[in-house]
Amino acid sequence: MKRYWTNETDLTPAAVAAIVDDDYTRGESWRSATQLIDAPYRVNQMERPEIEFVTADVSDKIYALFGKLIHSMLERGVEKIHGDNERLISNLCQGYEWVKTEDRLYATILGKVVSGQYDLYYRKDGRYVLEDHKVVGINEYKINRQQSKWEQQLNILAYLSRCNEHPVDEVAINCYYRDWSKAKAHFDRTGEYPKTQHMRVPLKCWTQERQRIYVEERVRLHAQSDPAPCSAEDRWASNAAWAVMLPGATKASRVLDSQDEAEAWLHARVMDKKVGGKFKAAKIEYRPGTSLRCMLYCEAAEICPFWGMMKAQ
């Protein structure tokens, strides 16, 4: 995708070349699997001719470069499975019968050509497995598990595979954490921090009928000529909140959904003889809601009419 680039942090020519050289293509298809799970309104904005005039700084794409690098290295790794280290690899990775990588598949769904490219497809211990690689932050891993976006994406890919007579018994994500810390993992007592920098996350592989229903539903949504603007979930939106703050405190004593709730909660604390003294000087701080994706991450935000209208309000 063409755009106006800037280089505010003075990245080297090699880094800039690697970032701006975007060789991604969805092939001869109407929508890709990644696009299908996204909001139709956003996909439409990304395909407007004006997107070529959106400004972006190369430093904002470093995170994407990490993903490209690991995909490239792992693709090369598949080519070397039967090389000089074949015996070692065979001993460390037992049960694999064959491994394929980075193949783009196509299927016609309700008259529309849909494509998807898996990262890894292999047969192990008699089962066919489809996997994707994700270079993510720790928090991003938690968010995607909650939203089930990865499960949706993998099941679209599994459906495309099945349409092309490639059976799929399992789907999974290989997470590579870019901000993982060995020290944090060692001292974590919550059980929430990943123990290793790589984690294989098995996801539910739907029945082919459920996959078909979901894919057709997404195709219908994307085929609309005038799709609805992105939902709050699509925008990663948070609601406005009212925080009760003590003098000098950096964290709120309580965050509530309305000013009335905040005032009632603070009044109850002030009237409490045990803690009332420290709450007499407390203040209520209004925190406006935000659409985090629109504000910081969506490449189409600069030309998006809906985001422009939200900012003007």
Image (spheres, rainbow, N blue to C red):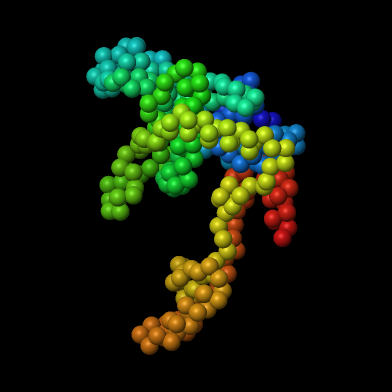
Residue visible at 58% across and 69% down in the picture: 286
Residue visible at 31% across and 19% down in the picture: 126
Residue visible at 47% across and 37% down in the picture: 150
Q: State left or right for residue 45 relative to residue 240.
A: right
- Total of numbered circles in the picture? 0
Camera-nearest residue between 119 and 252? 119
The N terminus, quarter of image: top right
Q: Quadrant of residue 95?
A: top left
Q: Is residue 39 visible?
A: yes
Q: Residue furthest top?
A: 83
Position of 242 relative to 161 (above/below): below
Camera-nearest residue between 164 and 279? 164
Q: State left or right for residue 241 relative to residue 197.
A: right
Q: Position of residue 312 (x, y in %)?
A: 73, 58
The C terminus, quarter of image: bottom right
Q: State left or right for residue 287 relative to residue 89.
A: right
Position of 165 relative to 187 (above/below): above
Q: Position of residue 268 (x, y in %)?
A: 45, 82
Q: Position of residue 134 (x, y in %)?
A: 45, 34
Residue visible at 38% across and 18% down in the picture: 99
Q: Quadrant of residue 168?
A: top left
Q: Residue furthest left?
A: 91
Q: Position of residue 90 (x, y in %)?
A: 27, 17
Q: Quadrant of residue 169?
A: top left
Q: Is residue 35 visible?
A: no
